[in-house]
Image (cartoon, helix red, strand yellow):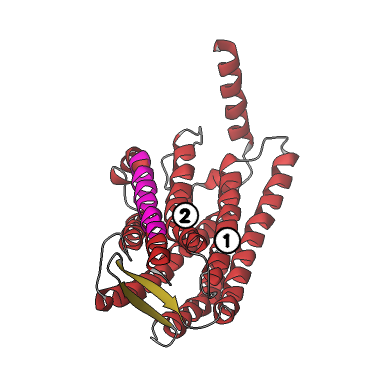
C-alpha cells in the first residue's frame, strides 16, 4: 500500500474511533440519571449486578476499542496483547448478556428451576465454544496478529487476520442457533400469555411484551454482529468497510444491552402493579393472569382516570 492509501486507512480508523467515543459517552450520559434511580438507590439483586457488569465492563471494552490502532498510538507489543485481551473481553461480555436473557426467561416461566437448569446446562457448551474460538482465532499469532505500520507520514497499528472467514463462520452457527432457541422460548410464553389475557378480555401485560421484544432485538443484533465478525476476517476489505463494521461490533452491544435492562425497569416504575415493591424478576403480576380482585382494581383505576381526565 502507498503512503496515501495508508493515510486514508488511518483517517477511517481515527474517525471511527472518535465516533465510538462520542456515541458511548453520549449514551452513558443519557442513561446516567435512570441508572442512579433504578440501581444505585435500590437494593441490589442479581439483575442489578448483571446490569453493572454489562454497563461498565462493556463501556471499558468499547472505549479501549476506540483507542486501539491509530487514535492513541501503541507499539506492536502493546497492540497485540490488547487486541487479544479485547477479543476475550467480547466473549465475556457475550456471556453476561446471555445471562440477562436466561434470567428473564426464568422470570417469564414462573421461575421454573427446571427451565433454568436446562438453559444453564445448554449454555455451558456455548461458553466452551467461545473459549475454543478465542484460542483458535485470536490467541495464536498465525491466525491473528497486529501489524505496526511506520512511514514518514503514518504510524499506527492495525490487526491482521491470517485465516479465511470460514472458521469464524462455522463457530458462529451454534451461537446463532442458541439465540434462536431463546427467542423461540420467549415467543412461546408470549403466545401463552396472549391466550390467557384473551380469556380475561384484558390487554397483554406490557412487561411480557417488553421482555420478548428485547429477546428479538438482541437476537437481530447478535446475528448482525456475527455476520460482521465474519466479514472482518475476509481479506482485502476496503478501509471504510472494515472501520464501519468494527465500529458497529465495538459499540452496538455495549449500548443495546444496558438500554434494554433500563427500559424494562423504567416501565416497571410507572406501572400500577400491586407487586411494584418486588424486584422485577420476582414480580408475579408479569407472568400470571390477573385475579378477579386485581382485574377489578385495574378497572376502577381506569374509570377514575376517565372521570378526572
Dominant secondary structure of the residues highlighted in magenta in the image: helix
Q: Which residue is mark 1?
A: 224
Image location of residue 288, percent across then percent down: 60, 47
Residue 280 in sight here: no
Nearest to N terminus: mark 1 or mark 2: 1
Is the residue under label 2 in contact with that under label 1 (CB below 8 Å)?
yes
Q: In the shown orientation, is residue 204 left or right of residue 267?
A: right
Is any part of residue 200 visible from this angle? yes
The part of the image, by quadrant, that contains residue 56 is: bottom left
Q: Position of residue 257 (x, y in %)?
A: 46, 54
Q: Quadrant of the N terminus?
A: bottom left
Q: Is residue 119 one of those drawn in magenta?
A: no
Residue 294 rendering spot, x and y as whole percentages = 58, 34
Task: Identify the image quadrant of residue 90.
Answer: bottom left
* Cα distance in 3D space between marks 1 and 2: 10 Å
Q: Provide the residue span drawn in magenta.
A: 11-30
**Depth order, front residue of 295/137:** 137
Residue 231 on image: x %, y %: 55, 69
Whether residue 298 is situated above or below residue 43 in the rendered picture: above
Q: Which residue is mark 2?
A: 252
Residue, x 29% and y 77% (percent of image)?
81
- Does 186 sit above or below residue 69? above
Assess whether residue 25 is covered by the magenta stretch.
Answer: yes
Q: Quadrant of the C terminus?
A: top right
In the rendered picture of this protein, how many numbered marks are placed on residues? 2
Amino acid at each position: 500500500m502507498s503512503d496515501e492509501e495508508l493515510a486514508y486507512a488511518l483517517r477511517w480508523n481515527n474517525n471511527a474511533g472518535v465516533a465510538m467515543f462520542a456515541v458511548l459517552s453520549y449514551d452513558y450520559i443519557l442513561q446516567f440519571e435512570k441508572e442512579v434511580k433504578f440501581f444505585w438507590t435500590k437494593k441490589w439483586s442479581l439483575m442489578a449486578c448483571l446490569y453493572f457488569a454489562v454497563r461498565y465492563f462493556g463501556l471499558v471494552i468499547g472505549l479501549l476499542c476506540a483507542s486501539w490502532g491509530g487514535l492513541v498510538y501503541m507499539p506492536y507489543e502493546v497492540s497485540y496483547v490488547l487486541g487479544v485481551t479485547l477479543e476475550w473481553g467480547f466473549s465475556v461480555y457475550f456471556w453476561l448478556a446471555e445471562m440477562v436473557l436466561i434470567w428473564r426467561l426464568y422470570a417469564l416461566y414462573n421461575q421454573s428451576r427446571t427451565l433454568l437448569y436446562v438453559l444453564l446446562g445448554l449454555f455451558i457448551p456455548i461458553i466452551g465454544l467461545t473459549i475454543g474460538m478465542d484460542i483458535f482465532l485470536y490467541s495464536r499469532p498465525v491466525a491473528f496478529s497486529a501489524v505496526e505500520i511506520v512511514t514518514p507520514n503514518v504510524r499506527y497499528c492495525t490487526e491482521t487476520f491470517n485465516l479465511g472467514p470460514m472458521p469464524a463462520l462455522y463457530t458462529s452457527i451454534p451461537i446463532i442457533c442458541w439465540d434462536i432457541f431463546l427467542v423461540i422460548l420467549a415467543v412461546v410464553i408470549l403466545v401463552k400469555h396472549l391466550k390467557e389475557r384473551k380469556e380475561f378480555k384484558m390487554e397483554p401485560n406490557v412487561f411480557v411484551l417488553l421482555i420478548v421484544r428485547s429477546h428479538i432485538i438482541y437476537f437481530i443484533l447478535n446475528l448482525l454482529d456475527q455476520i460482521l465478525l465474519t466479514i472482518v476476517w475476509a481479506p482485502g476489505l476496503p478501509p471504510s468497510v472494515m472501520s464501519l463494521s468494527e465500529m458497529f461490533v465495538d459499540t452496538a452491544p455495549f449500548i443495546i444491552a444496558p438500554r434494554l435492562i433500563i427500559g424494562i425497569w423504567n416501565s416497571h416504575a410507572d406501572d400500577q402493579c400491586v407487586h411494584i415493591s418486588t424486584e422485577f424478576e420476582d414480580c408475579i403480576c408479569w407472568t400470571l393472569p390477573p385475579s378477579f380482585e386485581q382485574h377489578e382494581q385495574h378497572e376502577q383505576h381506569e374509570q377514575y382516570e376517565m372521570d378526572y381526565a
